Amino acid sequence: MDCPACSGPVTLEVGPNQPLSASLTDVLLAANEDECIAISRNCWNCGWQEDRQIRVESIDTTDGDEVAVKRASLIEEITDELGAIERLATLEDTLAEVRRQQRLEPSTDSTEDGTTE
């Protein structure tokens, strides 16, 4: 978009609490119901600025894979928990436990015809 005042380039910032590189699409898709998203458009040539807010009233989804959604939610929750751990030894122990659990799970890589390579 060009600035309506001087036709210069306009930057788009999305917030609050979003990284500067966040795109409006990503923020909207990650939003929760009743969340307010602030959008600021700025021209650095002439100083023109426009602020807008979008409130998400409801979210309707279709054709979602419930297992994939649950898996993504769990991965996000695990990532948040791991990000809060400050002790390196705790992270190492957690990784070792995850690998141990993976070894105990039955393999899902088997072929349907029962042949092996």
Image (tube, rainbow, N blue to C red):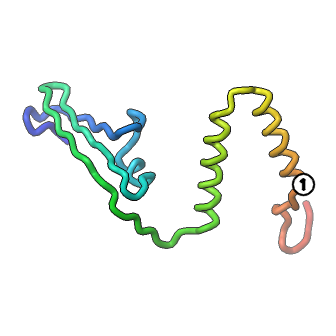
State the image quarter where residue 57 is shown.
bottom left
Q: Nearer the viewer, residue 7 or 46?
A: 46
Left or right of residue 32, residue 110 in this image: right
Residue 110, horizontal then vertical, whole percent: 85, 65
Residue pictured at 73% horizontal, 26% vertical:
87
Q: Which residue is mark 1?
A: 104
Extreme front residue here?
Answer: 34
Q: Quadrant of the N terminus?
A: top left
Q: Nearer the viewer, residue 34 or 80?
A: 34
Residue 3, horizontal then vertical, whole percent: 14, 37
Q: Amino acid at mark 1?
A: Leu
| Element assignment for label 1 | helix
State the image quarter where residue 5 is shown.
top left
Q: Nearer the viewer, residue 3 or 89?
A: 89
Disc 1 crowd rating (10 Å Cα; few below 14, some 14-19, many 20+) is few
Q: Nearer the viewer, residue 64 or 113?
A: 64
Give the total of numbered labels.
1
Residue 63, horizontal then vertical, whole percent: 50, 72
Left or right of residue 94, residue 38 in this image: left
**Is 55 located above or below residue 17 in the figure?**
below
**Is 67 located above or below residue 50 in the figure?**
below
Q: Quadrant of the C terminus?
A: bottom right
